[in-house]
Amino acid sequence: MNRLYVDGQAHPSLCGQTCKLCGRVAFPPNPYGCEKCGAPRSLLEECILRGEGRLEAFATTFHSNRKDRVVPYTVASIRLADGPVIRALMVQQTDEGLSVGQAVHAVMTLFEPEQIQTEPQIRFTTHGPN
Amino acid sequence: MAKTLRQLRPVYVVGIGLHKYQKLSDTPYVQLGLTAIHAALKDANIPFSAIESAYTGTALLGMAPSRVMLRHLGGSGIPIAHIENASASGSTAVRQAAIEVASGLSDLSLVVGMDKPGPIKFAHDSAGLTDLVGDYVSPFTHFALLAHHYMHRYGVSAEQVAAVAVKNYRNGARNPYAQRQEAYSLEAVMAGPAIAGTLTRLQCCPIGEGGAALILASQEAIARLGIDRSRAVQILSSTSRSEQIYAAGADPDTELTRETLALTCKEAGVSPDQLDIVEFHDGFSIEELLYVEALGVCAEGMGAQALARGDFDIGGKIAVNPSGGLLAMGHPIGPTGVGQICEITRQLRGEAGDRQHPNARLGLAHMVGIGSVCVAHILRRNG
């Protein structure tokens, strides 16, 4: 599977994909072919997208069909500064204090200790770099 | 040049049948399906031995469920096939049967949808693809995000979105086949529990079990078997599309719906404002607002106002989800798209009892399926 972000950064950049045939910039990347023009994998090139953008929409989820999932959590649609609109988890568990248009950036975080999370997870936040 | 359904032989719905949609029970799926099929055969007043092919819409039962069921109608040796197309499985089964009759390969085809809730395995999970959210985004989170985007863009409140559910429960309360047959006030819908974003439990469709069946016939079969022409409803169009790449940030379900509905109206030779009945995929309340606007029966961002005016009520400008839709009638997956055609046929025949929309002549059925796919049919009263 393609990597989604650059390892080892506190404020990670995302690994997107540029199609050399049609120019589409995509995230997440895929190992198969261009979803827009059908160009093969050999014509898809990794491109680094800044891990920053603005909130387009967000929703706090209060219910999960998975018993091991801690709720609530908040997912956002984010328009990246480099173009694509992506979906990502927010550091903030609820939407309190979030607003459409707000600037956000990616962080690596051990956010939910109750999940016995051992690996840092990429999430987005409105807070300044810390 | 490729042809549309309407350029082939005319296809008619001549029989409809349902097993009530309900919570998971001990009822075997065979019973759910057979109940619907027996009702459809009785409605058409034909024996099963007259049926020449069968298509089954199902997504959750596992491999090869049809003959286990159909053999109890007398093993007639007819060709059978199963259609899995996510939530649009039943709609796609309708489409395949309609194509078969229209092409002349069969004169009389059975469509049946049946399912029981169970563990759902998504092919996407083993596709070798990954993203940042994985299964943190269930359908309810996906549509909560679309709802937030819509509400912010057009200045629509959570209550205005929830009003969709109030209307659909009002309709479902008059539908004996609906899983949820209770009317709810706006306060009750908003009271929760909260599921995702502003969507409460009553703004999310129930996934239950059920059965739905149709008999599709050519003019030749109608004449040969002496089927009542006055109750036959013609399928004018059958249209299916899958998602493309849209502009960054565009809602793919709405864009896919927009292009599919425009195409099906064109194929049927019908303009959206001529439609009397629409059965939409209202898996979540917000969807109905997105789709009425995509259909073009009201302007972008004006769906909530039109709803509040009563435009989409039974007896209004266009009856939207008179069955109660997925929210009230329920969404047992395989049967859902087939059940929509049952409701539209009942409405166009004028046989919908106390939820009858007056003088219904044209109806549209619409389903989206995760993936995404979209299937639409337009039906017209005969005469």
Image: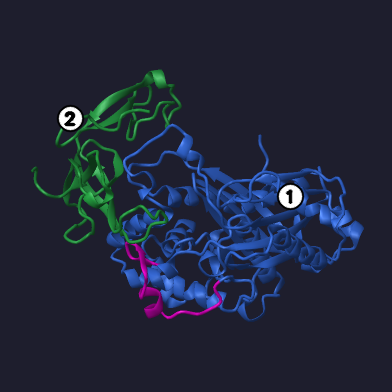
Chain colours: A green, B blue
Residue B248 in sight from this viewpoint: yes
Image location (x, y in percent) of residue B281? 52, 59
Chain letter behind tag 2:
A
Quadrant placement of the C terminus of chain B? bottom right
Quadrant placement of the N terminus of chain B? top right
Front-lying residue, B44 or B127: B127
Image location (x, y in percent) of residue B325? 54, 66
Is B338 on the left-hand or right-hand side of B272? Answer: right
| Label 1 SS | helix
Q: Is residue B195 magenta?
A: yes
Residue B10 in sight from this viewpoint: no
Residue on which disc 1 sits: B66
Name the residue: 73% across, 58% down: B30
Image location (x, y in percent) of residue B224? 91, 57
The tag on residue B296 is none
Label 2 is placed on what type of residue? Gly
Name the residue: 43% across, 26% down: A33
Name the residue: 23% across, 28% down: A48
- The quarter holding residue A9 reads top left
Residue range highlighted in magenta = B180-200
Name the residue: 19% across, 61% down: A96
Label 1 is placed on what type of residue? Ser
Q: Do dots 1 and 2 share one subunit?
A: no
Reply above or below: B275 against B354: above
Front-lying residue, B375 or B32: B32
Residue on which disc 2 sits: A8
Front-lying residue, B375 or B309: B375
